[in-house]
Every structure is written in structure tokens, then in C-alpha cells.
Image (tube, grey):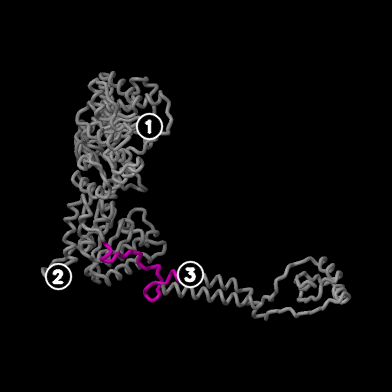
């Protein structure tokens, strides 16, 4: 408030000075209006003018009726004679000519004023708290006082192992004497590593909240600027501020922006600023000057690119893995976010958790939010399981494109394509169960066949991988069987790419080729300018290509054999999709048994909450989805 008053006072003073300068040099006129010179002469000759005042190039006059006027003086020598002839009273005023100094000042005043205002605002931006020092090198860390951090460990779900790793840090911040008495030292820094959205930032805030200490938060990119030395200055300033508030926590998000390996290939002088910033961070974390009571927590999903000096004991001497939650973790996270929305009685959080393998905490929070939005669109008072299922499908498969117009023949070909995926995936061994098949365009795909695992999976067998390749070829094989090999479409391009990559990895990385055995023939990395060199001879490369070709061909033939043996089911499923657009796992089971199917549960447009509950209660919610198991016609 004090700075605002000072600024307003300065601006007001400048305005008054400018006004006084210009107002003193302007004549004080009564209200008047301009007239032409010819009208002025006519008024004089008509004896309508009583007096005039000549002031340089202007003539001010007054009429008989008291009105005033102004006209331009063209230096007409006859004008004076005319005025005297018709008895007009004449006054002559000497023009007010400002002094030479005033003229110079007036001519330069706008420029000087502009410069003054510019300097004022520049200084205002640069003024910092430390005696008006330049703030360009000041830390941009956001400070949250101990009473402002409201997050607690109970608000962080699904990362129990990570919480166990950091709970002793909270105890140290609360009672450091207990550790110091035994000569123990708490980790100076903790590096949280994990995919985006897993709760690394939330966990860091929970540590500060539980310990009741100030929390400094900054991004790694906030340190680096185009000017060399600015980042290092900001690091010093941040630790200076932290020392004044110790014990405290400094959280650096996306530290890989500033902590990348130094002296890598292709590094030039343009990295001097980043390297100086990193050097200063290394010194502050474990240098000659002790920073007792300051714990640095950093987060990244690229720990492999960080400088080794940053990861050594004494700096970030503990790494906490914050991975994707398992089924128990997903259930805990869903419960935390579900408490904020009204849920219908049919919502089963456990079933929802089983149906979201591979989801991060942020994605699970978004799932609940999307379900609430679906319920709001239908003016419902509670969020149902049907709403959450729709939200999950939207997140995995993309939004439905109901306005996209496709011809019947194109829809039928898409139906055969997706039915081919579903039938092959249903029959081959160790394949994830079919969850849903749809020819409704979603995202970038014209159709979707979705397979959901029965449980969290952390590895895959050779049989399972080959089954995935077979089901990926199911769409192309179905097109070839029904329409002929010359009528197949580009819709299988993504399927072919993924099947080929799976086969290549099985041969070159995972040692699943009987001919080559357990050998790694993967491409080496780190070549010149990003080039990759094959660590093998041309003969070995040819053998690898032959093995990949054999694996692809054998699984293509298996898919073809399966669909030929189930051609009637292929026809029935395709035309059922043409009629219903989407079928679920229950309808797929009935079609595989040759039964007449009922309308799919999720295609019934609910008219009331009770109708939704009735439909939902008749459905057993089984295992759900993983993005890698969606086979789409794109």
C-alpha cells in the first residue's frame, strides 16, 4: 500500500507540473466560436461588431448582442481602415512569446516525460526487498508459510511405499535433536522419480504440511535465463531465503531442466548458463557453507539424464520411486476423489479400480471429474457407474464423433475389421478378455476393439505376445477374407506397425527367438548426431529380418485360420455391430456361442436414475482397461 501511494503521488506531481507549464502559455478565452474572414468583414460593414482585439494572427471580437467570435488575421492592411471607418473599437495585444529556455523546455517536455515514466516503471520492476537491489537475479521460488500448507499424508493415496521412505524426514524436521544426539544425519536431498501425474509434487507438499515448516516451490526452468550468471544468482538467493526460515523444504519440480549431465556430446557454449546454475546448486547443497535444516526435494521423470554429481550421497542421497499405483493404490486414490462428489448406490470403487490399470493418480482424479460432468449434462443429482464407465471410455478411446458421416459399406467394412480383432483375441491363448467393440468413430480411429486385463500385469510370456500379434492382424485378415486381398484398406496401418514392433522386440531385445536364442541385438544408442549403429554383421541382420518375417507370417496365418473356422460368427458380429454400433463383453460371449443377443447395456439411453440403476445392477463389472490393449482402426 505504501509503494502504491508513493507511485500515485509521483504520477500526480508530474501531471500537475505539465499542466501548469502548458496552462501558463495558453490565452484565457471566454466562450466563443470561429467565423470566416469574409463573414467578419460583412459584420463590420453591417455595424454588428462593437470591438475587436488583435492578438498576432487572430482577431477576437464582440458583437452588439454580446456574443464573442474569433477569426484568422490574414494581415490585410485594409482591415484596420474598415474597422476605423465603421467605428469599431480596436485593441492590440502583444503576443506572449515564451523565453528561449521555456521554448526549449516545452519542445523537449514530451520526450523528457516519456523517459521519466519509462525509468520509473523499470526501476519499479527492478526494485527488490534487499535494499532496492536488482531483482533480475532474485529467486522466483514461491513461499508457502507453515500455516498455508494444508496437504497431509492422508490426502496422498496410492503411494504407500513412497510415503514410508519420507516419513522419517518429517520426524527430523519436527525433532532434529533426536537424530543429532546419535550422530545421525537426515538426507540432505530427496529425488522423487516417476511418471507424470503420480503425485510427486503432492507428496512433497504433504511432507511440509506434516512437518509444519515453510515450503519453497520452484520449477527447474525458472533458474535458467538467456544471461549467464542469472541462474546461479537465483540459486544463491533461494538458499539465502531458505536459511532465514530454516527448518524448511525447497521443492524443485522438473529438475532435469537444470540438472542435466554436463559435457555431453554436442554441448556448446550455449549451455554455460545452465552449467553455472547446476554448479551453484551443487555447491549450495553440499559445499563449504552448511545449509542445516534445509531439505531439498526434487521431482523428475528423467532421472537417467541427471548429472552424476547431483545424485551422489550428500546431495540427493535418496531416490524415492513414485510409480503408477496398483489396484489397491487406485482404489485409495479413487476414494479420496470420490468423497468430493455425490455417488449413486451402484458405484463400486473396487470394480472401477480393477478397470483402470495403468492410470496415474492425476488420470484417476480426472476420471471422477469427467463422470461428474457426464452426470451434470443429464441433470442428474448423483454420479452413476454408467457415467464413470463413459468417462473411462472417453479417456482411453477418445470422444465419440457422432456427427461424422460414413457410408453403409464403409461402416460394414469397419465392422468386419473390428469383429476380426475381437474373434481372434477371444480365441488365442493368454490374451486379455475382450471388453468392448465399437464402430463409433472415436479420436483418430474409425472403430475400436478394446481388451482389458484381468489383473495388473508386469511381464508377458511369449505365448501372450504372439497372441497379441495374431489379434492385431485379425482386422486385416477379416478384410481380406470378405472383400479380397485387393480391397483391403489402410485402416490396418497402425495394427501392422505395432505387430511388427512387437515381433522385432521379441527377436532383438527379449530373446524369444528359438533360432537366435537369448541374445540382445537392439540398436546401440549415442552415435554421432543421434545416429544408431547396428552391433552386428550384415549376415546376422539378415537372419534377424528372417526371424521377424517368420514370426509375423506365422501369426498372420494363425489369425486367418481362426477366422476361416469362425466365418459365420464373423458375419453375425459384423452385422450386429452395423445395427448396434457398440457391443459389450456379454454380447460378444453370446455371439461366440451363436446366440441372439440383447441390446448392449451401455447403449440404452437412460431416462431416469432408477432405469440406470436397474440396468447397472444387471451387469457384472469385470476387469477393465489398459491403453496399450486398445486395438483401433485408424
- In primary-sequence order, the first of circles 2 and 3 is 3
Q: Is residue 43 found left or right of 169 in the rendered image?
A: right
CA gap between label 1 and label 2 equals 64 Å
Residue 255 occupies quadrant: bottom left
The structure residue drawn at horizontal position 34% and vertical position 42%, both measured from the top left corner, is: 379
Does residue 67 appear left or right of residue 300 in this picture? right
Q: What element carries label 3?
A: helix
Identify the secondary structure beneath mark 2: helix
Position above or below: 105 against 419: below
- Residue 177's tag is 2
Quadrant location of the N terminus?
Answer: bottom left
Snapshot quadrant of residue 37: bottom right
Q: Mark 1 highlights which residue?
A: 446
Q: In which quarter of the image is residue 467?
A: top left
Q: Which of 338 and 14 is in front in this view?
A: 338
Q: Which of 133 and 545 is in front in this view?
A: 133
* Residue, disc 3: 121
Q: Does residue 287 lie above or below 423 as drawn? A: below
Task: Determine crowd level at label 2: few under 14, some 14-19, many 20+ residues with C-alpha closer than 10 A.
Answer: few
Amino acid at each position: 500500500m505504501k509503494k502504491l501511494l508513493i507511485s500515485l503521488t509521483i504520477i500526480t506531481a508530474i501531471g500537475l507540473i505539465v499542466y501548469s507549464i502548458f496552462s501558463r502559455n495558453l490565452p484565457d478565452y471566454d466562450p466563443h466560436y470561429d467565423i470566416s474572414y469574409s463573414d467578419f468583414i460583412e459584420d463590420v460593414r453591417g455595424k454588428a461588431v462593437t470591438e475587436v482585439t488583435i492578438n498576432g494572427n487572430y482577431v477576437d471580437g464582440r458583437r452588439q448582442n454580446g456574443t464573442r467570435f474569433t477569426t484568422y488575421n490574414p494581415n490585410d492592411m485594409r482591415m484596420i481602415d474598415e474597422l476605423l471607418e465603421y467605428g469599431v473599437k480596436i485593441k492590440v495585444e502583444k503576443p506572449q512569446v515564451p523565453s528561449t529556455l521555456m521554448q526549449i523546455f516545452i519542445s523537449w517536455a514530451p520526450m523528457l516525460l516519456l523517459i521519466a515514466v519509462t525509468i520509473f516503471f523499470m526501476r519499479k520492476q527492478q526494485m527488490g526487498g534487499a535494499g532496492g537491489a536488482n531483482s533480475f537475479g532474485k529467486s522466483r521460488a514461491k513461499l508457502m508459510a507453515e500455516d498455508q500448507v494444508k496437504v497431509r499424508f492422508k490426502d496422498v493415496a496410492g503411494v504407500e511405499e513412497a510415503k514410508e521412505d519420507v516419513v522419517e524426514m518429517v520426524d527430523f524436521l519436527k525433532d532434529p535433536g533426536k537424530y543429532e544426539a546419535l550422530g545421525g544425519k537426515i538426507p540432505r536431498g530427496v529425488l522423487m522419480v516417476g511418471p507424470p501425474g503420480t503425485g510427486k509434487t503432492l507428496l512433497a507438499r504433504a511432507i511440509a504440511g506434516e512437518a509444519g515448516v515453510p515450503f519453497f516451490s520452484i520449477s527447474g526452468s525458472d533458474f535458467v535465463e538467456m544471461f549467464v550468471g542469472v541462474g546461479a544468482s537465483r540459486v544463491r538467493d533461494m538458499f539465502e531465503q531458505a536459511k532465514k526460515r530454516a527448518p524448511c523444504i525447497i521443492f524443485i519440480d522438473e529438475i532435469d531442466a537444470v540438472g542435466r549431465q554436463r559435457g555431453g556430446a554436442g554441448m556448446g557454449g550455449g549451455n554455460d548458463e545452465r552449467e553455472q546454475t547446476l554448479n551453484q546448486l551443487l555447491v549450495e547443497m553440499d559445499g563449504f557453507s552448511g545449509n542445516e535444516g534445509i531439505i531439498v526435494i526434487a521431482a523428475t521423470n528423467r532421472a537417467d539424464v541427471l548429472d552424476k554429481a547431483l545424485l551422489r550421497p550428500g546431495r540427493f542421497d535418496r531416490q524415492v520411486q513414485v510409480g503408477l499405483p496398483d489396484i489397491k493404490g487406485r482404489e485409495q486414490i479413487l476414494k479420496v476423489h470420490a468423497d468430493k462428489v455425490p455417488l449413486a448406490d451402484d458405484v463400486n470403487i473396487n470394480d472401477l479400480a480393477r478397470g483402470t490399470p495403468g492410470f496415474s493418480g492425476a488420470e484417476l482424479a480426472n476420471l471422477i471429474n469427467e463422470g461428474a460432468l457426464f452426470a451434470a449434462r443429464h441433470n442428474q443429482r448423483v454420479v452413476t457407474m454408467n457415467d464413470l464407465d463413459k468417462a473411462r471410455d472417453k479417456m482411453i478411446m477418445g470422444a465419440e464423433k457422432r456427427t461424422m458421416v460414413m457410408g453403409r459399406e464403409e461402416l460394414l467394412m469397419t465392422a468386419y475389421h473390428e469383429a476380426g480383432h475381437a474373434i481372434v483375441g477371444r480365441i488365442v491363448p493368454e490374451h486379455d478378455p475382450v471388453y468392448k467393440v465399437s464402430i463409433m468413430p472415436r479420436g483418430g480411429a474409425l472403430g475400436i476393439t478394446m481388451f482389458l486385463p484381468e489383473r495388473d500385469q508386469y511381464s508377458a510370456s511369449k505365448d501372450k505376445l504372439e497372441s497379441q500379434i495374431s489379434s492385431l492382424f485379425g482386422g486385416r485378415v477379416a478384410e481380406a477374407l470378405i472383400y479380397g486381398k485387393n480391397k483391403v484398406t489402410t485402416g490396418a496401418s497402425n495394427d501392422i506397425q505395432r505387430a511388427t514392433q512387437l515381433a522385432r522386440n521379441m527377436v532383438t531385445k527379449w530373446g524369444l527367438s528359438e533360432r537366435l536364442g537369448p541374445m540382445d541385438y537392439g540398436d546401440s544408442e549415442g552415435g554421432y548426431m543421434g545416429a544408431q549403429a547396428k552391433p552386428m554383421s550384415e549376415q546376422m541382420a539378415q537372419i534377424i529380418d528372417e526371424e521377424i518375417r517368420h514370426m509375423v507370417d506365422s501369426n498372420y496365418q494363425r489369425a486367418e485360420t481362426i477366422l476361416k473356422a469362425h466365418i459365420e460368427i464373423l458375419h453375425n458380429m459384423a452385422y450386429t455391430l452395423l445395427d448396434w454400433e457398440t457391443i459389450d463383453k456379454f454380447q460378444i460371449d453370446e455371439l461366440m456361442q451363436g446366440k441372439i443377443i440383447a441390446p448392449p447395456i451401455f447403449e440404452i439411453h437412460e431416462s431416469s436414475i432408477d432405469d440406470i440403476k436397474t440396468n447397472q445392477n444387471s451387469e457384472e463389472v469385470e476387469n477393465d482397461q489398459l491403453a496399450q490393449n486398445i486395438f483401433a482402426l485408424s
